[in-house]
Image: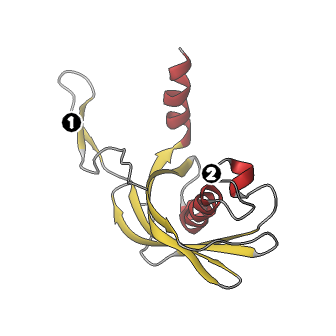
Amino acid sequence: MTAVRQGGSSCPSETKVDPGAEISYTFAMDFNLKSGVKGEKKTSVTDRNTAEALGSGGLPVFATPAMIALMEGACVAAVDPALPEGFSTVGTGLDLRHTAATPLGMTVRAVGELTEMNGKELRFRVEAFDDAGKIGDGLHTRFIIENEKFLKKTLAKLG
C-alpha cells in the first residue's frame, strides 16, 4: 500500500481577535505522549474476517483489511487513552506488508509502537503475529483531532 497524507502544520498560527486587540497564538497542545508507548489488539480468525468474507480475495484466510484494522486498533490503544477528553486520533497513512496467511481458528495479535511525534502527527511501527509467527509489519500515521470539530466538518459534507 502507499502512504496517504493529510493534516496541517504543527507551527503556531497567528489569530487576530479584533482590530486593535492583542495578537493571540494557538500552539499545539502538549498531549503528554512519549515515543515507545505500545498498544496491542487481538482477534480470532473466523468466517467473518476472511479475505473471502471481506471481498479482498477468494480464500478463507485472515484478510489484509482485517489485519490493517487490527494494527490501527493497536495504535489507538497505545495513545487514545492518554488524550484529553474530547480528543482522539484518526488514521491517515499506511505502508504495510501482509507477509503470511493465517487459517481459520488461529489468533492474530497486532502491536503498535509510537515512534515519532510531530505536533499532532503520530507515527507508529506496527507488527502482526499469528500463533506461528509474524504475518505483517509496516508503518502507520495518525493525527490527533478534536472530536466535535472533526465531526462537524465531516457532517458539513452532507450539505
Q: Give the residue pinned by disc 1.
A: 23
Answer with mark 2 or mark 1, whichever residue precedes in sequence. Answer: 1
Q: Tell me which amino acid carries mark 1.
A: Ile
Mark seen at residue 56: 2
Tell me where residue 89 appears, x and y as whole percent: 52, 52
Left or right? Give the position of 152 relative to 56.
left
Foreground tag (2 vs 1): 2
Q: Is mark 2 on a helix, strand or loop?
A: loop
Q: Which of 74 and 70 is in front in this view?
A: 70
Task: Please name the residue shown 39% across and 54% down the image.
Answer: 2
The image quadrant of residue 118 is bottom left
Residue 37 appears in the figure = yes
Q: Nearer the viewer, residue 111 or 134?
A: 134
Task: Please name the residue shown 29% across and 51% down the image.
Answer: 10
In the picture as drawn, the residue positioned furthest to the left comes out as: 20
Q: Above or below — where is 39 with respect to 22? A: below
Tell me where residue 24 appears, x and y as whole percent: 26, 39
In the picture as drawn, the residue positioned furthest to the bottom comes out as: 132
Left or right? Give the position of 82 relative to 51.
left
The image quadrant of residue 107 is bottom right
Q: Above or below — where is 116 with respect to 147? A: below
Q: Exactly how many numbered labels are in the figure? A: 2
Tell me where residue 151 appears, x and y as whole percent: 55, 33
Categorize mark 1 by other alpha carbons within 10 Å: few (<14), some (14-19), many (20+). Answer: few
Residue 127 appears in the figure = no
Q: Tell me which amino acid carries mark 2.
A: Ser
Label 2, label 1: how many angstroms apart (C-alpha)? 52 Å
Q: In which quarter of the image is the N terminus?
A: bottom left
Task: Please name the residue shown 60% across and 67% down the image.
Answer: 74
Q: Which colour scheme is used?
A: secondary structure
In the picture as drawn, the residue positioned furthest to the front comes out as: 58
